[in-house]
Structures are given as C-alpha cells and as structure tokens.
Image (cartoon, helix red, strand yellow):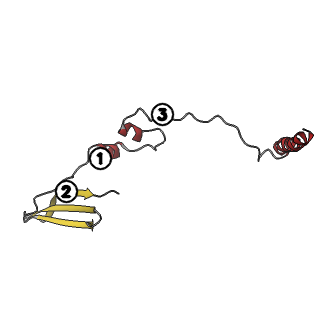
Amino acid sequence: MFRRVASTVPAQASRAMAAAVRPSIAPSFRAAAPAINNARRSYHEKDMSTHLPSLPMSLLDHYSKPRNVGSMQKNDTDVGTGLVGAPACGDVMKLQIRVDPNDNTISEVKFKTFGCG
C-alpha cells in the first residue's frame, strides 16, 4: 500500500507544478462547441451546414438547376462532338457544340459526364 501512494504522489505533484511554473503548457479546458445534428436533415440540407463558407447564390442556383446537360443529335451536320476520358474504366465526358452556319458562332452547347469521380 505504501508503494502505491509513493508512486502516485510525484505524478500528481509534477502535474500541479508544471501548470504553475509553465502556464503556456497547461492544457486549456474549454467547453466543446455543440455538434450539429445532421442525422435528420435531407441530403441537400446537409450541404448547407454552418461549417461551410458563404457561397454566392448564383453558384447554389447552378448546383440546384444545372444547365446545358444532355446531348444533341449526332447526325446533324452543324454539331461537333468531343469525347475525352477512358471508356474502358467508365470515366468519360462528352461535349457537343452546335455552330450556326450563317455567322460561324457557337449557338448551343451540351455535355454529359459518366464516371465515379
């Protein structure tokens, strides 16, 4: 019993001494911030948690309603199609543009992406 008391006293004394002598090393005991409960929120509400930075409304609008997604008729003569990626593993992006034959400007753009990333 004496051995047990003798071995614990120096440890307690050294902790008290370290806090008194070097306060910068002493651990700061702060109350933890309350955790946000995301368990009952829908998928997109989890994206709007308070830990995210403030995002422009135009970015959130494009996220909610993507534009120019889809494809055009590949047999049209005024449509150009580009395909990039690795079809063997499934990561592919297809980009199609429609060029106005009268003034040679791009009049429509569509894209589709496939893959896991």
Task: Identify the amino acid type marked 3.
Answer: Asn
For disc 3, the marked residue is 37
Q: Is residue 96 left or right of residue 73?
A: right
Q: Which of marks 3 and 2 is in front?
A: 3
Q: Are marks 1 and 2 in contact (CB under 8 Å)?
A: no
Secondary element under disc 3, as helix, strand or loop, is loop
Residue under label 1: 62
Q: The residue under label 2 is which amino acid type?
A: Lys
**Residue that label 2 marks:** 110
- Marks 1 and 3 sit apart, C-alpha to C-alpha, by 27 Å
Q: Which residue is drawn at 33% across and 56% down?
A: 116
Question: Residue 10: where, in percent of width, then height?
Answer: 88, 44
The disc, 1 or 3, on the residue closer to the chain's N-terminal end is 3
Kindly state the secondary structure of the residue where label 2 is placed: strand
Which of 51/84 is in front? 84
How many marks the image carries: the answer is 3
Foreground of the two, 87 or 69 = 87
The picture quadrant where one finds residue 23 is top right
Q: How crowded is mark 3: few (under 14 residues within 10 Å), some or many (20 or more)?
A: few
Residue 117 x/y as whole percent: 35, 57
Mark 1 vs mark 3: give the one in front.
3
How crowded pointer 1 is (Cα within 10 Å; few <14, some 14-19, many 20+) is rated as: few
Label 1 to label 2, Cα distance in Å? 15 Å
Task: Tell whether 38 sits left or right of 100.
Answer: right
* Image coords of residue 67 (percent x, y): 23, 49
Q: Residue at x 83, y 45 (%)?
A: 18
